[in-house]
Structure formats: C-alpha cells, structure tokens
Amino acid sequence: MEPGPLSRPAEQGRCVSGSPSAGAACPASLPSTAGAEPGSRPAAVAAVLPAGGCGERMGVRTPKQFCRVLERPLISYTLQALERVCWIKDIVVAVTRENMEAMRNIIQRYGHKRISLAEAGATRHRSIFNGLKALAEDQPDCKLTKPEVVIIHDAVRPFVDEDILLRVVTAANEHGAAGAIRPLVSTVISPSADGCLDHSLDRAKHRASEMPQAFLFDVIYEAYQQCSDYDLEFGTECLQLALKYCHTKAKLLEGSPDLWKVTYKQDLYAAESMIKEKISQEICVIENTKDEESVGYLLKEVLRNELNFVNITSTPLEHTGGNIQNFLIAQCYSFICVNVVSSNFQETQKFLGTLEESSLPLLYPVVVVLVYFLDLTLVPLTQEMENLMWIRELAKEVKKRNVLLSGLLINYSQDEQKLQESLRQGASIIGALVKERSSALAGQLLVA
Ligand SMILES: Nc1ccn([C@@H]2O[C@H](COP(=O)(O)OP(=O)(O)OP(=O)(O)O)[C@@H](O)[C@H]2O)c(=O)n1
Ligand SMILES: O=P(O)(O)OC[C@@H](O)[C@@H](O)[C@@H](O)CO
C-alpha cells in the first residue's frame, strides 16, 4: 500500500491525503447505514474525481481534463456539475503533482468551492485510492470528514446531473455499491491467440460500465486497501473491486447517454457542441424603454418564429441591473439589446456594467448583440457603421470578461415586406451568433 502523499490544499486549511492505517478486515456485514431504508439518501456524501491521467488517446500535449472547451478547461465543467448538487459536501480531485498549480488556478478562476486536492497515482485506481485516503479520518491533522457514501466520477465526464448522482448514492446506501450502466453500442468479441475470432458476447446480455459510481465509504476504502498490486495497476472497474474484495454486489442503474467519457478528440468536439446547445436555449431581449415598443416586440416575435426550441424572454433595460444575476443563474447567457437610437454608447455601457458587477464568475461566454433599427434609405450605411465603430473597441474590452459583443444593423424599411425580410435575416444572424458563440465574431458589425 503506497503512502498517500501530502499536497497543499486548494482551500486554506483543507488537508488532503496521507497514508491510512493498516485496513481492518472487510466488514462482514455492511456498515449500519447499509441497512438504511430503501430510497434514503445518506447525510454525508463526498466525491472523488480521478484527474491524473495524461490523455494519451486524445493525442494532444495537454492532458484532456485540462483541454479547453469554449475557452474553459473540461474539468471545470465536471466540477460545476457536481457543485450544483448541494448535498455533496466535499469534492476531492486527484491530480498529478505537476498539475496541482494549474488545478488550483482553475479552482480560483472559476470560483469552484468544496474542492480539495490529492495527488494522483500512476494508474486510475491508484489515483482513486489516493482520493479516498484524503477522506479517510485515520490521517494526521486531516480536516476532511469521512463520508458515509462516496461518489467516484471520472473528471472527464462533464455531463452528470443530480438525478443519476442521487440514484447511485441512494442505491449505494442500500446495497453497498452502485454504478451507472449503458447499453453496448458495439458487440464485445474475444479474439483467439492467432488474432481470429474466438467468440462474441451476446450484446443484449452485457452493458457498458459508466460513471458516476457510488459506494459505502468503508466498503470501497477497504477494497482498495486489500487490492492487489495487479488490480491497482491494470484494473479499470471499481465495482469489481467491491465485489472481489468485499463481496459487495453493486446495484446497476441505467444512465443517460450523456454520461460518456471524453477519451478521443471527437469527444471533445461533441462536448463543445453539447455545451453550446445547452447554453443557447435561452435568449433575453433587453428593450430600450425609449424604443417604440413595437420594435423590440417585432424582433421578439420573429426570433420566436425563427429560432425553434429557444426560449425568448424580454425585460426593460432599466430592470436588468438587479436581475442580471438571476438571468445567469437561470442559465441565460445570450442578450439582445434592442435600440432605435443609434450609437447610444451610454445605454450599452450601463447594461454591460451590470455584467461586470455580477459576482457570479462568467462560466460560459456571454453573447451580447446590440441591435440597431435604422431606415437605411434615410441614413447612409457607411455613416452609421462609422457611428458604431465604438463597438469594436468596447468588444475588445469586455471579451476579457468572457463577453462576446457584436453589433447588428437591421434595415427598418417602411416597406412592410422588406422589414419582415430584414427581421427574419436579423433573427438568423442572432441565432448563429448565439449558437456558435465564436470569439472570432466579437466586435463585428453585421447588417440584415
Ligand atoms: N493515472 C491516472 C490515469 C487516469 N486518471 C483519470 O481517470 C479518468 C478516466 O481515465 P482515462 O479516460 O483513461 O484517462 P487517461 O488515462 O488520461 O486517458 P488515456 O488512457 O487515453 O491516457 C480521467 O479523468 C483520468 O484523468 C487518473 O486520475 N490517474
Ligand atoms: O481509464 P479508462 O478509460 O481505461 O477506463 C475507465 C473506465 O473503465 C471507467 O471509467 C468505467 O468503465 C467505469 O468503471
């Protein structure tokens, strides 16, 4: 049993790791909580996230858990997913010594809480074991308290929701161990020594083991303490360790397709698309109260017609100050500021200022589109573009705060048909800006 090395805590005073005392024999019967009422969630739940791999199959220099998705490290999304669950009291992340500083910077930059760090091991099982040691109370001056149930979840599985976490924890509380499974996509075959097919498994009778998994802490901790070096070195299945060393048969729970593990580069592209899709479901139209109300209303209606599956809300500009946080909490990261008066820099500054003042770290790029309605038969386009050049400079400034600002001129033609056409084109442009959330378009002035 290798010692669990000490590492400086991510949060002051949080000690991590340390070598546990020699493990007692595997508990003959499951600990008291194991007899818990079916369906009851234990009070004390913690999580261990193995994040000490090098991502060889990803084929890039950066370990995949630190690869950026929408300019933010992948692991930050997983931490955010777990932090949304208020009843997980501690999250221990196992990272390599050389990545400790990078991990602390991520925790600080994105405002992650309840995080402690443990040093990763040479294999995933060894990393998990070190994470468990950080939670075991038999450690000198360790501040983390031992949980009743511990969740084990790969740091590169960012799409985990409270429902599956609660299900595995509740099942582990009752059965001692539980894990998410998924139907196999490919058939599992067994090759013979000469590289030919020996036999194939009946796909209908087998499942893929995914994450999250959960265990009564004493069960999985004991299993790791009894684990052979071979299993620590070559094993990939925590549920098997609970079975083999603690005779605990894990409860298997069907998980959603989102539980997949980011392993290859295409998984990173898929993760980015899913995150973009998730945060593009809400658009808030900020109406300038000086506007003729019909302009903002018209655009809202066209947006609703053109952008299916997107929830379009609206609010008057002067109301955004107080509730910008509410928008961010409600997962709204796209704002369309409708103006009729051209180049009203002050109004825009006022709105962007509320984003600046927001105490919530902007975990996703916030798209802000300044929409100007102008009858281009009355005002030469070049002159108006000149008037709006301040958007380019302002966009550079707010991009540092993860805000992607761009301008959109919509021809407010007196001809009803032309106006409708411009509105539809404007809605399509807004839809693309929101969906693609590309920093390359920040500061651009577009015309519909
Ligand atoms: N020594 C290791 C190896 C892996 N992991 C973690 O275990 C999770 C799942 O492992 P895997 O997908 O295999 O990650 P890598 O080992 O990094 O990938 P590869 O096998 O392609 O190198 C990842 O979050 C990874 O960081 C770990 O904590 N310690
Ligand atoms: O680390 P690897 O990618 O080799 O394997 C990890 C997976 O086996 C593991 O996350 C699930 O199968 C559940 O145990």
Image (tube, rainbow, N blue to C red):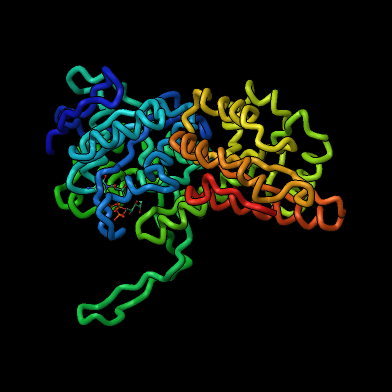
Q: Is residue 408 above or below residue 199?
A: above
The residue located at (29%, 31%) in the rendering is 104
Rendered residue at 37%/34% (across/down): 47
Please name whichever residue, 309 or 226, is drawn nearer the observer in this view of the structure.
Answer: 309
Decide which of 143, 355 is in the foreground and name it. Answer: 355
Looking at the image, the residue that sits furthest to the left is: 2
Quadrant that contains the C terminus: bottom right
Q: Is residue 180 visible?
A: yes
Residue 170 appearing in the image? no
Q: Is residue 433 above or below residue 343?
A: below
Q: Quadrant of residue 194?
A: bottom left
Residue 106, position as x, y percentages in the image: 34, 34
Left or right of 13 on screen, residue 249: right
Does residue 183 sit above or below 349 in this rendering? Answer: below
Could you tell me residue 108's position as x and y percent? 35, 28
- As drawn, 281 above or below 142: below
Q: Position of residue 404 (x, y in %)?
A: 52, 42
Identify the residue at horizontal 43%, vertical 69% (top origin).
Answer: 186
Left or right of 178 in this view: 386: right
Q: Which residue sits at x=51%, y=54%?
A: 273
Q: Quadrant of the N terminus?
A: top left
Tell which of 125 and 226 is nearer to you.
125
Across and down, in percent, residue 157 comes to 41, 47
